[in-house]
Image (tube, helix red, strand yellow):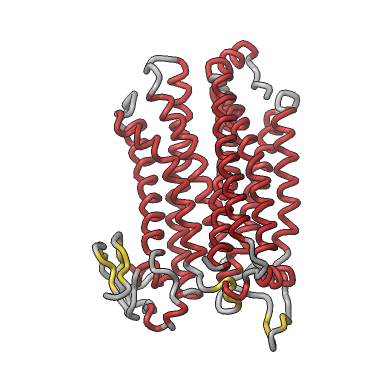
Amino acid sequence: MDELVLARSLFGTTMAFHIIFATLGVGIPLMILVAEIMFQRTNDLDYSVMAKRWTKAFAVLLGVGIPTGTIAGVQLSLLWPGFMEVIGRVMALPFQIEIYAFFIEALFMSIYVYAANRIKPWMRIVSLVLVAIGGLASAVLITNVHAFEGTPAGFDIVDGNITNVDPWKAFFNPSFFVTAGHVALSAYVAGSFTIASVAAFKMLRLPFESRVYKFHAKALMICLLTGGVFAFFTAINGHESAQKLQEYQPEKLAAAEGLFETQTHAPLSIGGFTDREEQEVKWGIEIPWALSFLAGNSFDTEVIGLNDFPEEYWPPLFVHTLFNAMVGIGSLLIVLALVAYVWKKLLKKDRFPKWLMWLFVAAGPLSILSIEFGWIFACTGRQPWTIYRILSTEDSVTSTGNIATLFVLFVTVYAVLAVAVVLVLLYYFKRNPPQKDIDKAESTEIPLNV
C-alpha cells in the first residue's frame, strides 16, 4: 500500500473517531441549555436533573474529544506538510481564534458545573449559552479550513510562490457560511437524537407507570422535537450546499448524483449505485428535473456532467452512495420527529408503540452515521485535490514513510479510548441512576450540585 493511501487512511480514521466527540460536543450543550430553560420556565425538577446528568456525559466526551482533536492537528502537520505550508501562510486565523473559543467553552462550563447553586437562574442560562457558543465556534472555525479547501480564496500563486495573501478573504471564503450552518445544524441534530435514543432505550426497559419512565419520556420528547426542527433546517441548508457545489465544484455534484452528461432538466437519482462503465446509476429511482431545480431553483438549470471533466479529476463514484445515505437518514429523522409530535401532541396518546420506540433507539446511532457519511462525502468528493484545483492530495503528502506503523498504533489507541469511554459512562450512570438524582433534587428543592 503506497504512502498516500496510508496517510489518507490514518488521517481519515482519526477524523472519523474524533468527529463523534466533536459533534456531540456541539450538540449536547444545546440540549443542556434547552433542559435548563425548561426548568426555569416550568420549575419542573426533572429538567434540572436532565441538565446535570447530560453535563456529566458531556464532560466525559469532552475529555476524549480534546486529545483526539490534538492528535488530528499533529497529524495534519506530520502527514500533509504541503497542505500545511499553504494553510500556515493563508488560513491560520481559524486555528488561532479557536483557542479563544475553547477557553470560553471551558470557563463557562466550569462556572455552570461548580457554581450553579451560587448564581442566579439567568446567570446559569448565560453560562450555558456561552458554553454552546464556544463549542459551536470551535467546530465552525476548524471546519472552515475544510470549506477553504473546497472554495479557496484570499491568495494567488505566481510562479509557484504564494502572493497577495488576504487572511480575512480566505477566512470568509465563498462556502464559509453554508458550511458553518451545516456543521451547526447537523451537530444539533446528532446531539438531540443521541440523547433521545438513550431515553427511548431506558423507557423500553421500565414499567410504564414508574417515576423514572416519566422522567425519560420528558427527555425523549424535548430531544425529538428539538432534533426534528434542526433536521428540517439541515435539509434546507443542504439545498444551499448543493447550489454552492453547482457553482464552485460541479464535478462533485455530478458524482454525487451519478450524472455523466451535461443537461438541463437533469433528474435526481435516489438510491442505486453508479456504474462507471455504463455511465448510469443502476437500481436508482429518478425524479425528473429535480437535480436542475436543486442546483439552481429552476428546471432549466444546466447541470454539468462528469464527461465534461478529465477523468483524472473525477471524484470516486461511490460518493453517490454516501450522499444518498446521508440524505436518507436525515429524512428519516425528520419523519420520526413529526410522527412523535403527531402521536403525542395531536392524537394525545400516552405511549408510543414498541416498534416506534425501537426506531427512536436507532435514531441516535443513525444520526452519528449520517455525520460520518457526510464528512466522508465532503472530503472524498473533493479528490484528487487537497485544495481544489490548486494543490493535489498527492503533492501534499509526506515522504518520510513509516505510516503503516503509526496507523496500527493510533487505531489501537482509538480502540482503547472507545472502550474506556463506554465503560466510564456505564459505570457512572449505573452508580448514579435517575431515581437517585430525582430524590436528591426533590429533597433539596434546588438544582443539583454536580
Residue lying at the far bottom of the rendered structure: 159
Image coordinates of residue 115 in percent, x first then y, are 74, 28
Q: Is residue 181 above or below residue 367?
A: below
Residue 50 location, quadrant: top right
Q: How many marks?
A: 0
Taking the image as shown, residue 333 lies to the left or right of residue 107, namely left
Q: Is residue 139 above or below residue 165?
A: above
Residue at horizontal 54%, vertical 59%?
9
Residue nearest the observer in this picture, 379 or 190: 379
Image coordinates of residue 84 in percent, x first then y, are 69, 68
Residue 245 seen in this snapshot: yes
Taking the image as shown, residue 279 lies to the left or right of residue 48, namely left
Quadrant in which the C terminus is drawn = top right
Image coordinates of residue 16 in percent, x first then y, are 53, 52
Residue at horizontal 31%, vertical 74%?
266
Residue at horizontal 30%, vertical 59%?
271
Taking the image as shown, residue 385 lies to the left or right of residue 85, namely left
Residue at horizontal 44%, vertical 51%?
370
Residue 171 seen in this snapshot: no
Image coordinates of residue 32 in percent, x first then y, are 59, 35
Q: Is residue 163 above or below residue 42?
A: below
